[in-house]
């Protein structure tokens, strides 16, 4: 039986073993984010197992685009996206070879802890028991086995965790804010606490007394009622302020509920004099336990914007001190920090988090630059130094920003959600988007399914969360077909690009420069849009010490682009040769181009239509 109280945990025993070491440099890693319920159920046929052997005993056939697109009737397929679909921890374990062969070195997994029993919170953000794995996903032993298997393949494991709130674990006895036609008042934020009816039972009814629970006297509380561990049942754990209406109003966005998810009181006071609440101390101990139990390598911390900086600082300190004590010197804490570069920088500096996710508008500028609808300087300018970042050139951006473009909620797109490939021609240049993400500054992260050109779109998050393993909610509005195809163009080419990235330290740690181009070899300037679009070669360099690696993509979908491209004059002499390390046109790989005395130093570069190249 899983523990009910933190006092039941034996940390001294748990930590008496060696732990997997942390990465030396997280910017060397390639992250892969997946929604566990939507990734794998382990029943796929004709895929390659972790050792590279073809599996022929599975149940779910491989997707065939010639016949399987749209094989699911829309209404039942649409409904299936709102409920549990069946991905598991053992299923993910069976696909670690797929990830390793792609070049992934760290897997970021959506929350796995036990959810409220009466709602299909497949996404994992509705936690009811922080000390247990949700049975839909498997067991705590399955988690430990997954991490062990991942480490054996050189893959680190990052868990998505929640501090700000629990699941819908209690019901309000609301006494104000009636809406027209409502049959009961709404618990809507107005700065005052609401009375509580009780903790919810397995049916979602507030039938359990709101306070410390004795499971023997109240059997409805265990295992599917109230909230666990028991320390989270004490008075004052929840703010009880009702749901957030204005997401930018302070303190509403700090103390209000995320819809029906219940906000936790993490403490009070200024950042430097913050007093952590018993609930925050309990949650810090919970997550220390899971690190010790499963040998985890990092956390992605949800909704950092909605927590006091003092609370985040306390948590970061508690986790880093614990992980250092067991030999994990570089356990990474990645915070979901929205609100721009300055907010991200100050939040990291003040709290001790290691990296920020969701900085400024990197996803937007990356996506639409590749599609030829943004000026390149708009994207590359996001990584330029400023008075804000008074450190070595480019260093802060190198290992403190996690970059991606597809994700599981796409807040940036409002009510019109759409993966990169949802547009008419997105599939033609999605490799370029991945390549730009992987060879420009930051810690790159791939969202599951992007490497298979998933094209989900609609007015809800669920359309971004298709099942890799098929089921009733497969990608491309299919069902009963899986997508673990290692011979598809994007997967195979992405694996080749990642192999070059592993070989060239400059692509992982180097300074970054958008390069000037010229059509005639005389007049140089940065590439820019003309008439609302750009259809040309876009080059950038990564420089580390005396090594320069030149990358370029072509936003012209139909024709190759040729241009003179500026290089670092101090690192090259006229007559030097650059060698093609990678090209979407395989005939270019291994060929050379000479450096000439133009605009300092330059080479004449040709990039295939909708293509990408790397030269050194």
Image: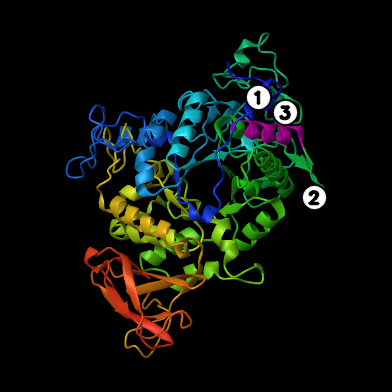
Crowding at mark 3 (Cα within 10 Å: few <14, some 14-19, many 20+): some
Which residue is under mark 3?
195
Give percent across and percent down for residue 33.
Answer: 45, 45
Find residue 125 and report its image quarter: top right
Q: Regarding mark 3 in the picture, which secondary structure is present there?
A: loop
Q: Regarding mark 2 in the picture, which secondary structure is present there?
A: loop
Which badge, 3 or 2, comes first in the chain's sequence? 3
Q: Residue 454, can we see it? A: no
Give percent across and percent down for residue 408.
Answer: 45, 45
Q: Main secondary structure of the magenta part?
A: helix
Which residue is under mark 2?
270
Residue shown at 38%/83% (left/top)? Answer: 602
- 412 vs 333, left or right, is left
Pick whichever, 1 or 84, lies toward us: 1
- 122 vs 520, left or right, is right
Which badge, 1 or 3, comes first in the chain's sequence? 1
Measured along the vertical axis of the image, is residue 434 above or below residue 244? below
Which residue is under mark 1?
13
Measured along the vertical axis of the image, is residue 76 above or below residue 537? above
Residue shown at 63%/40% (left/top)? Answer: 327
Give percent across and percent down for residue 529.
Answer: 39, 76
Span of residues in magenta: 277-290
Q: Is residue 67 magenta?
A: no
In what quadrant of the picture does the C terminus appear? bottom left
Give the Cα distance between marks 3 and 2.
28 Å
- 1 vs 79, left or right, is right
Which badge, 2 or 1, comes first in the chain's sequence? 1
Give the Cα distance between marks 2 and 1.
36 Å
Q: Regarding mark 1 in the picture, which secondary structure is present there?
A: helix
Total numbered circles: 3
């Amino acid at each position: 039986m899983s523990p009910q109280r933190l006092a039941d945990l034996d940390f001294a025993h748990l930590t008496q073993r060696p732990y997997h070491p942390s990465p030396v440099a997280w910017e060397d890693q390639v992250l892969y984010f997946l929604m566990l319920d939507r990734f794998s159920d382990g029943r796929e046929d004709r895929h390659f197992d972790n050792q590279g052997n073809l599996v022929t005993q599975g149940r779910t056939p491989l997707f065939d685009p010639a016949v399987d697109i749209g094989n699911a009737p829309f209404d039942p397929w649409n409904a299936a996206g709102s409920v549990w679909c069946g991905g598991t921890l053992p299923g993910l374990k069976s696909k670690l070879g797929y990830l390793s062969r792609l070049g992934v070195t760290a897997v970021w997994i959506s929350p796995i802890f036990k959810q409220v029993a009466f709602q299909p919170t497949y996404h994992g953000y509705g936690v009811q028991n922080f000390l247990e794995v949700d049975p839909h996903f498997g067991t705590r032993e399955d988690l430990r086995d997954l991490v062990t298997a991942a480490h054996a393949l050189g893959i680190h494991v990052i868990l998505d965790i929640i501090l700000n709130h629990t699941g819908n674990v209690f019901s309000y006895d609301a006494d104000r804010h009636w809406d027209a036609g409502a049959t009961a008042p709404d618990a809507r934020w107005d700065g005052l606490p609401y009375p509580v009816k009780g903790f919810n039972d397995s049916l979602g009814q507030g039938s359990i007394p709101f306070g410390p629970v004795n499971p023997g006297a109240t059997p409805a509380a265990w295992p599917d009622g109230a909230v666990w561990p028991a320390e989270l049942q004490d008075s004052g754990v929840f703010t009880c302020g009702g749901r957030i209406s204005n997401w930018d109003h302070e303190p509403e966005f700090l103390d209000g509920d995320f819809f029906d998810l219940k906000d936790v009181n993490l403490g009070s006071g200024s950042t430097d004099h913050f007093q952590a609440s018993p609930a925050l101390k309990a949650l810090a101990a919970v997550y220390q336990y899971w690190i010790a139990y499963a040998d985890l390598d990092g956390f992605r911390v949800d909704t950092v914007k909605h927590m006091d900086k003092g609370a985040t600082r306390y948590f970061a300190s508690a986790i880093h001190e614990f992980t250092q004590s067991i030999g994990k010197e570089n356990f990474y804490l990645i915070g979901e920090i929205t609100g721009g570069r300055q907010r991200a920088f100050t939040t990291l500096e003040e709290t001790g988090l290691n990296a920020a996710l969701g900085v400024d508008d990197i996803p937007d500028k990356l996506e639409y630059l590749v599609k030829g609808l943004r000026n390149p300087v708009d994207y590359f300018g996001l990584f330029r130094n400023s008075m804000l970042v008074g450190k070595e050139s480019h260093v802060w951006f190198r290992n403190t920003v996690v970059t991606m473009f597809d994700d599981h909620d796409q807040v940036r797109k409002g009510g019109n959600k759409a993966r990169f490939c949802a547009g008419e021609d997105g599939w033609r240049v999605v490799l370029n988007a991945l390549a730009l993400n992987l060879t420009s500054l930051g810690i790159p992260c791939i969202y599951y399914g992007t490497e298979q050109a998933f094209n989900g779109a609609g007015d809800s998050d669920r359309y971004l969360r298709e099942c890799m393993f098929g089921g009733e909610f497969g990608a491309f509005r299919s069902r009963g077909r899986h997508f673990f195809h290692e011979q598809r163009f994007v997967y195979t080419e992405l694996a080749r690009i990642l192999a070059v990235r592993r070989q060239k330290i400059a692509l992982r740690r180097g300074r970054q420069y958008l390069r000037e181009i010229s059509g005639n070899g005389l007049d140089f300037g940065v590439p820019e849009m003309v008439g609302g679009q750009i259809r040309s070669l876009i080059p950038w360099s990564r420089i580390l010490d005396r090594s320069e690696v030149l990358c370029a993509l072509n936003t012209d979908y139909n024709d190759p682009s040729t241009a003179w491209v500026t290089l670092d004059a101090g690192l090259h002499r006229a007559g030097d040769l650059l060698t093609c390390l990678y090209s979407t046109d395989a005939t270019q790989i291994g060929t050379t181009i000479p450096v000439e005395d133009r605009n300092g130093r330059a080479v004449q570069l040709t990039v295939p239509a909708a293509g990408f190249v790397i030269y050194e």
